[in-house]
Image (cartoon, rainbow, N blue to C red):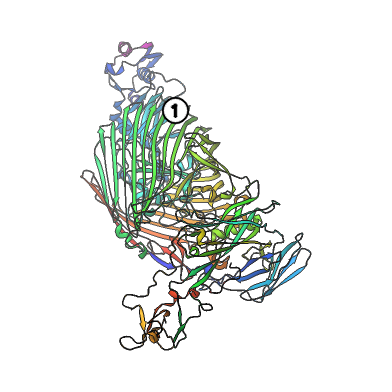
Amino acid sequence: MFFIQISRAQQSTAKLISVNFQQATITQFISELESKSSYHFYYDRVQFDSLKITLQVNDKPIETILDLAFKNTDFYYAISQQQIFLTKGRQIKTELATGFLEVAPSEKEVKQTSAVADYTDEKDKKVPEATTENKLYEIGIKTNSIKQGNAILTGYIRDIKSGEAVVGASIFIASSKAGVATDKFGYFTITLPRGRHTLIIRGLGMRDTRRQILLYSDGKLNIEMQEQINSLREVKISADKVANVRSVELGVTRLDIKNIKQIPTAFGEADVLKVVLTLPGVTSVGEATTGFNVRGGSADENLILLDGATIYNPAHFFGFFAAFNPDIVKDIELYKSSIPEKYGGRLSSVLEITNREGNKKIFTGSAGLGLLTSRFNIEGPIIKDKTSFIFGARTTYSDWLLNLLPQAYKNSSASFSDFNLDISHQINDKNNLYLSTYLSNDKFRLNSDTTYSYSNKSVILKWKHNFNSKLYSVISGGMDRYQYDVSSTANPVNGFDLAFHINQTNLKADFNYYLNSKHTINFGLSSILYQNSPGTFEPNGSRSLVLPQVIATEQALESALYLGDKYDVNTNLSISAGIRYNIYNYLGPQTVDQYAPNLPKEAGNVLDSTTYKKGQFININQAPDIRISARYLLNDNLSVKAGYNTLHQYIHLLSNSTSISPTDVYKLSDPNIKPEYGDQVSLGFFQNAKANTIEMSVEGYYKRLRNYLDYKSGAVLLLNQHIERDVINTDGKAYGVEFLVKKTAGKLNGWLSYTYSRTFLKQNDPNAGELINNGNYYPANYDKPHSFNFTGNYKFTHRYSISLDIAYSTGRPITLPIAKYEYAGSERVFYSDRNVYRIPDYFRSDFSINIEGNHRVHQKTHNSWTIGVYNLTGRQNAYSTFFTEQSGVISGYKLSIFATPIPFINYNIRF
Amino acid sequence: MSCRKSYNPPAIASPNSYLVVEGVINSGIDSTIIKLSKTVKLSSGTTTNPVLQAMVFVQSDQNVIFPLTETTNGNYVSAGLNLDNTHKYRLSIKTGDNLQYLSDYAAVLNSPPIDSVSYDTKGYLTVPGLNIYVNTHDASNKVLYYRWEYQETWIFHSNFPSYFKSNGDTVLIRDLANDNITNCWGNYTSSTIVLGSSAKLSKKVISNQPIIAIPSTSEKVGDAYSILVKQYALTADAYTFYVNLKKNTEQLGSIFDALPSQINGNIHSVTNPTEPVIGYVSIGSTSNQRIFITKKQLPDWVTIPFHTDCELAYPGVPCCYYVYPPGPPNQVDAYINYKKGGYLYPLIPINAIGLPGHPPIGYTAASRECVDCTLRGTNKKPAFWK
């Protein structure tokens, strides 16, 4: 188009020509024009053999004729005196400077309105090379005139260096507010009006890029993006700077591993889960727990997925470390409110952890050394550009740490390790295979007596198939296992071995159908077969007199069908609505007790017990779940969003330690244990300021819970043949408001969040055997009304930066023994109402300095150091409180784990 | 890096003195005993804290009053009340500091008679032993819940039979008829709460409700054993109270323990309705039954004595103590005659050493706990003993 302007400037003595072409070839076209004018044409016939020209004009200059003939194609002409050069596409190169201006203004505008000090100024940004950015891509079946209407463009967005999929990148055209994001395979589908467009592509941690396209009809375009090496300029929290305001979802946060790595952690190693705790609406019950609570949900109400595999114990070493290797993880995404239809089975949240794909072009790797752990990763192509692998391993040497713990933990030892091996393979344009495997092991011994060990194992195979530009599917199958084992041989007579495991086999089919520019439809089905062993207790050693005790294995099938639609009503209003239909079957072999109606579930009230055969359906629970969210744009930078969702949960964690510990039991719903149910309404306002560099949000929610499990007094959870006799169903409510301010660019970036939230439970069924707190609402164990977090990073130069982390929260509730007395022949302890007291408030601040090695690109290795202090003020936060009796006197104690400032250092190397 | 510090929040450190009421209003001919005490704080060395000088009476819904009189240790007693079973009753307490407490009105719920107290020798889990059961039923189908208390009595023997006794100055022959310290009766009153329910059954029968399991090695089953089982009828409310009390027992509130819950009884403060009051007062008669079991009725079990380290001769200490040993001093005076010798733990003489017809030249002896069964029981035969 700009060539036309140039050539017009040259035109002075125009000779008028009349022509009439019907499907003319380029040869016919040119010989006609050469015969009617004095111009001579230069061109490559091969390039033009697909062009057919239909044109009728009378008495027009040659420029006009050429304009019309080449309109909406990527053929260009240049007139130089009596010569006309015809070219295809690439001639843009010579006229780059002028051409670039056309897309530049939008960027200029950003710069002008940016009030944030931007470290990287213009001189750092190289003028784009004549890369693909300025090439015009023709898409679809070419015609010389563009038809009316829309066409669909699909494709993959990949990292140019590693060939890895770029997830969550947004693709949009400057002229419209409509945009789409890539899925976890880097795949996108967008509907655009036919014709010429400039696509703008933005990805998390990637340099913004653009593509010129000429869209004739439906077609494909794969786009490669460059990594944003200079992370000073933009530390993006969100994939798309405008996603905060524009996306339909509420309560969704995506964090890139780069953000995660900036946050100081106890031992200097980036911790995926600790970062989650800094987000609004997320709390934990204690210092060294990796179990977390989202919007007043308990720790087992979070579905933790590692590349689609369910991870039951996401922590190593009493919860000091997340069980995910930070060198392998690519990003995490937490859904607190708008949980996509394809997920279910948990009440509170979904935490999706996505691993990187191996580098498809070259072999690279990294290694890290810390005070407690070392890690290593290597990745590379198996078949270049087609198949790649990534392998990661971590191990620990943490025994010295245990020697710093109180006397009670002397002679203890602990070790852990985890391994990832992922392979991705591109079969062809339409088919991709992804294999992910994961193994984690933990083993610790307290006081040379009892050995605890636990392990997660997962394998998952995914097959992505593109049917056409509108429909694709992902079929996946896999197995997840979580097991633990407690054994002791300290006293040969009492030597025992206690084992537990969960086995789940998953099968899933997800379909994504891009109906048109207004509707994107998701549908699919999934099924999980559980085969759990709730506990076996066996003698350990030949002299052991322990009697074996085996709790019958449990089987269940949890299936779901779902259908969802994202509907863009207009540019301002978007609605996402879906339904998930859950079907849950408890399966034999099993013996199930029936209790007398309206009486507590106690041994004395068993009416009958029924034995079911293998594979027999014992009961069926069916229930639909609803997911709705909507967004309305009030203006370009301000939106309001609302959502409602319902969820069911069929697997329950039984834990009396308020966090996840290796002796907890997972129990499946059965005829005596009802599925948990929850629903949530939420409303939020989202605003971006200062050219999208500051994101603000306020979100409020109200949640109801049904059949949440709490425990009867003196409940025994381990090796209990009849767990239903020790648990009670409670109803709950949770509400809160979350404030978040994020700064995503500039020397100083980070976020600040404050959450006010409450969670209450109520047990008022007089038939349950006991009322808790007279049947009134009482705070849940993890009810922490006030929670404040600050996470900030300040860059002095490219090489030096500092991070500061501040966390404050109200202490969690506790039930205290407050007096003792004699009754019925024994001394007894009198307890307060449940959870009426609180442990002291929690406060912690951490600081770290990050030093990058030099930034020369062509060196063999890149290294970096992290030095810092955890718990800067040395505050003695309570990890646990406990009471012991010594010579008739009961005394209370508070145990603090990180009671002093803890310095740490970490060395990382990349090759 | 980590530390353990004393944790003493105000809720624990404050006196936490709440009224505890224990007892049953006996509607029949047996006496009614109500025990009043107050809770003490956890750090207290003693748990006994009786409430003295209170005014306690039973009150009917017709406002008939039956006063109880204070005895010792916070016990308030009345002889058989013989209450009219058609009325409801409650307990009224006015403490010395003028605070008033009332229990909820409740109907009289009399315990049906115990059908039998039975036993078997199957043992408990893997431990062989004696199991005691109770069987009862309520012909009127009114009583669904029960509580039992028991008193055990058994004969046991000291490790060594003593035929001599020191009066402090000299060793005399023991009066075995009146001063036997070899054969005693031990006794134990239940300290665990035994509960039973027939609520789920179509016929309101309690069959073979376990009361206690005694291991075969216990000295309780070494000679003769007797158990008295007392049966109380409970309302559903009272049953729930005792179930919770049982579960809350002995556990401490560490975060790794099961969550306790507060005990709610049927007694309330009139002065301050939110003040916790511990205890449940039920109204009704009790029924009792006693059985005897002798060693002949049991398998050939070997019992383990209470003290397992009793020997006549200790390493380094001779078995025998002589008046005139191969040389002075007089060992009998030194070890046995406690007024003469300075030995801190005088030994009890067992048998004489010497030629028949001559004064003993010495005695065998052992420490008191090996010889004197009255340290752990009584040598007075209980009135009920057959």
Q: Is residue A25 magenta?
A: yes
Q: Chain of mark 1?
A: A
Q: Which residue is painted at 35% across and 75% down in the image?
A: B313
User: Of helix, strand and loop, which one carries label 1?
Assistant: strand
* Residue B13 placement (x, y as % from top left): 52, 70
Is residue A584 shown above or below A652?
A: above
The residue range painted magenta reads: A20-39
Count of numbered labels shown in the rendering = 1
Q: Which residue is painted at 34% across and 88% down in the image?
A: B329
**Based on the displayed image, in which of its 4 quarters is residue A372 positioned?**
bottom left
Which residue corresponds to mark 1? A192
User: Residue lying furthest front in this view?
Assistant: B357
The answer to whether residue A679 is left or right of residue A52 is: right
* Residue A208 placement (x, y as % from top left): 36, 38
* Residue A484 placement (x, y as % from top left): 38, 48
Residue in the foreground of this view, choosing between B10 and B218: B218
The answer to whether residue B7 is left or right of residue A394 is: right
Badge 1: few (under 14), some or many (20 or more) residues near its Cα, within 10 Å? many
